[in-house]
Image: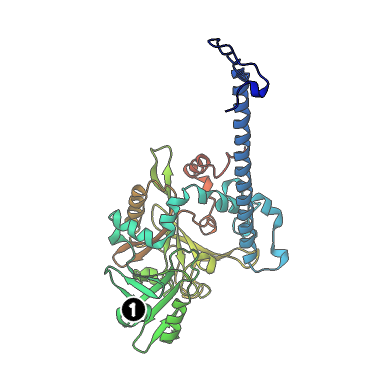
Amino acid sequence: MDSAADHGRHPAPDGAAQPVPSPTPPPPSFPRKVVRKSRQIARKADHKRRNWRKEVRKSRRWAEDYRKFLRKEFRWETSPDMRRPQWWAQGFLSRSVTLYDLPNEDQQDYVTDVQRYTRTKRMVHPHLQEILDNKFSFFLLMNQLGLDSDVVPLLGLYSRGEVHVFPNDDQVPLREFLETRLEVGQRVFVKPLRGAEGRFVVSVRRTADGWRMNGQDRSFEDVASWIEARPKPMIFEAAVPQAESQAQLNPHSTNTLRVLTMPDLTQGKEPFIAVAVQRIGTSRSAHVDNWTQGGLSAKIDIATGTLSRAGQLPDDHTPVWHTVHPDSGAQIEGATVPFWEETKALVLEGAKRLNFMEYIGWDIIVSPTGPVILEANVNSGMNVLQVHGPLLKDERVRRYFEKRGVVPKKRN
């Protein structure tokens, strides 16, 4: 083993204490003030980064909303001289300018199209909206709340080539369902799980001689192929017969009521009916009564259930009004909605049980025995309602929309 001498060092004498090496000095510690300051800087940087991401998401959402606004504008196929771009910055579509008679009316009393597309739809949390937007989950919710007897019957749900039959728990192929589960003379509506404005909704009836779809003769193959071509799930709803006076308005469509409810913030959030209209189908809207498809809208007097004259989306800058139906000749202005008191009671009871939703547009069919809930939504169209007058003239409505950030306070 090498000795100390081998390395040119003198060994320590026997019994002598070995030298103790000097301890390494600790690194200088930072003052607490510097540590706190650095942490504050890091937190501010993180906060700015989160805010930046939030602003990016906000900008993207705004851009998407504006694209929707423009798509809606140009869905109206008309000549360029019919456009009113000077009103786009105020939030109004060109058609709305005509319907609301702007600028002759005070635009501050109207919920604008932009406010409807960007704000009213966000008053209810998206996860809650999904419950009403999905027609199947809405049906299940109504059953859970004990309102199942007041809802249109659900016959089946189609997905991946098969139909889950209700109220049974069996699944059968689509074609077998059509051939064995639909009786001769029975009429059903086939609808997407999610959808609005009557798009991709078809009426199917089995007759003694074959099949009819949207009132026209079709082969079994036509009906089955159309449903099989849908890329998303569909539901089968039973057609509910209408009260006689409702059917007389237009016998070729189910003529529904749209009733808008919201809470009165001065009365302990007690729900009230803000506005109600009678929708009526026409030859232009075919088998549905949807306003955007060419249907009519008559305002319902909330106290009496009496109808006003009916408005219709115009093709030019001239508002279109009807006191009688343009096709059936049935009297509209002055007619009375049957079971109106029962309808009001039903939607107000529904609004109380769904008070966590707050803002709901109810679609009601008036049957020979009373009102039946067809569906509900949380972002009702505004044209169909405000064609008869501005919503915000009602102080309860204005107060609610101001509180929820939909509209600013009215300028004097």
User: Quick check: can you spot residue 161?
Assistant: yes
Out of 122 and 245, give the one closest to the viewer: 122
The residue drawn where x is 49% and y is 66% is 290
The residue drawn where x is 38% and y is 55% is 304
Disc 1: which residue: 177
Coloring basis for residues: rainbow
Quadrant containing the N terminus is top right
The answer to whether 13 is drawn above or below residue 260 in the figure is above
Place of residue 248 in the rendered image (x, y in percent of width and height, measured from the top left): 40, 72
Extreme residue in the bottom direction: 209
Horizontal side of 21 relative to 157 (left or right) equals right
Q: Quadrant of residue 259?
A: bottom left
Q: Quadrant of residue 339?
A: bottom left
Q: Amino acid at mark 1?
A: Phe
The residue drawn where x is 64% and y is 20% is 5
User: Quick check: can you spot residue 216?
Assistant: no
Horizontal side of 81 relative to 225 (left or right) equals right
Q: Secondary structure at mark 1?
A: helix
Place of residue 22 in the rendered image (x, y in percent of width and height, measured from the top left): 61, 15
Quadrant containing the C terminus is top right
Horizontal side of 142 relative to 16 (left or right) equals left
Place of residue 172 in the rendered image (x, y in percent of width and height, measured from the top left): 32, 76
Place of residue 263 in the rendered image (x, y in percent of width and height, measured from the top left): 42, 44
Horizontal side of 196 relative to 181 (left or right) equals right
Q: Exactly how many numbered labels are in the figure?
A: 1
The answer to whether 150 is drawn above or below residue 348 in the figure is below
Extreme residue in the top direction: 16
Out of 397 and 373, give the one closest to the viewer: 373
